[in-house]
Image (spheres, grey):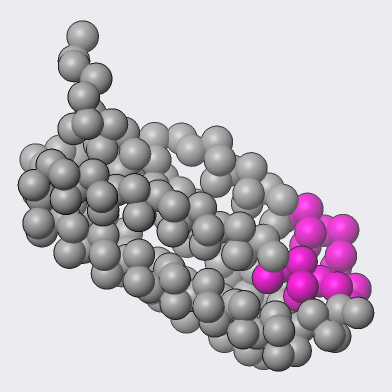
């Protein structure tokens, strides 16, 4: 049995976020299509494009480790995305749909921010400067997306839902 050290945990968590990003990539177009707000739709579309680059960066990290880019089922992201699907079904054509979509998207962002922050710290501890740079780039994108979603919620969507 392989040693359960920080290297193993790093790889397991990398597989987790790789799976999560692939699922998020599939979900974003559905969320964009469901959004009534043009700003929200545009934010989902922009993040869909960013997610493609984030997946590529994760693949580079797998390459740095000499490991195949493989995901490991992530129950957490499955649950968060299922909540988003429920909101799309239960609030279809309702004034609160966009607020619900926004909340679901921010739950995804917060999960990603947590994972990327942890992976970056571990990569630093494991003396993987190239991985740190790649993870930091993605972490900054995720934080910016979260800020954009907050701005859209505060400036329009929450008021329209009320």
Is residue 30 visible in the rendered image? The answer is: no
Residue at 87% across, 58% down: 90
Residue at 72% across, 73% down: 34
Q: Quadrant of the C terminus?
A: bottom right
- Name the residue furthest top: 1
Where residue 91 sits in the image (x, y, percent)?
86, 65
Where residue 107 sits in the image (x, y, percent)?
61, 58
50 sits to left or right of 5: right
Where residue 156 sits in the image (x, y, percent)?
75, 89
Q: Quadrant of the N terminus?
A: top left
30 sits to left or right of 49: right
16 sits to left or right of 4: right
Where residue 161 sits in the image (x, y, percent)?
86, 79
Residue 150 or residue 41, whichever sits in front: 150
Residue at 64% across, 42% down: 79
From the viewer's perspective, is residue 145 above or below residue 123? Answer: below
From the viewer's perspective, is residue 134 above or below residue 6? Answer: below
Residue 55 or residue 148, whichever sits in front: 148
Q: Magenta region, mostly helix, strand or loop?
A: helix
Residue at 84% across, 85% down: 159
State the image quarter where residue 113 is shown.
bottom left
Magenta residues, start to end: 85-102
**Number of marks drawn:** 0
Taking the magenta stretch, the answer to whether it contains residue 142 is no
């Amino acid at each position: 049995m392989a040693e359960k050290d920080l290297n193993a945990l790093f790889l397991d968590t990398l597989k987790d976020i790789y799976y999560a990003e692939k699922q998020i990539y599939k979900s974003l177009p559905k969320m964009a299509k469901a959004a009534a707000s043009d700003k929200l739709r545009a934010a989902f579309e922009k993040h869909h494009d960013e997610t493609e680059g984030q997946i590529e960066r994760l693949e580079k990290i797998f390459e740095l480790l000499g490991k195949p880019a493989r995901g490991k089922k992530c129950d957490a992201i499955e649950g968060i995305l299922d909540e988003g699907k429920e909101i799309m079904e239960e609030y279809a054509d309702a004034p609160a749909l966009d607020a619900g979509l926004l909340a679901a998207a921010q739950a995804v962002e917060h999960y990603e921010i947590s994972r990327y922050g942890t992976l970056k710290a571990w990569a630093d501890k494991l003396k993987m400067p190239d991985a740190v740079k790649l993870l930091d780039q993605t972490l900054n994108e995720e934080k910016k997306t979260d800020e954009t979603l907050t701005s859209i919620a505060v400036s329009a969507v929450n008021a329209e839902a009320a």
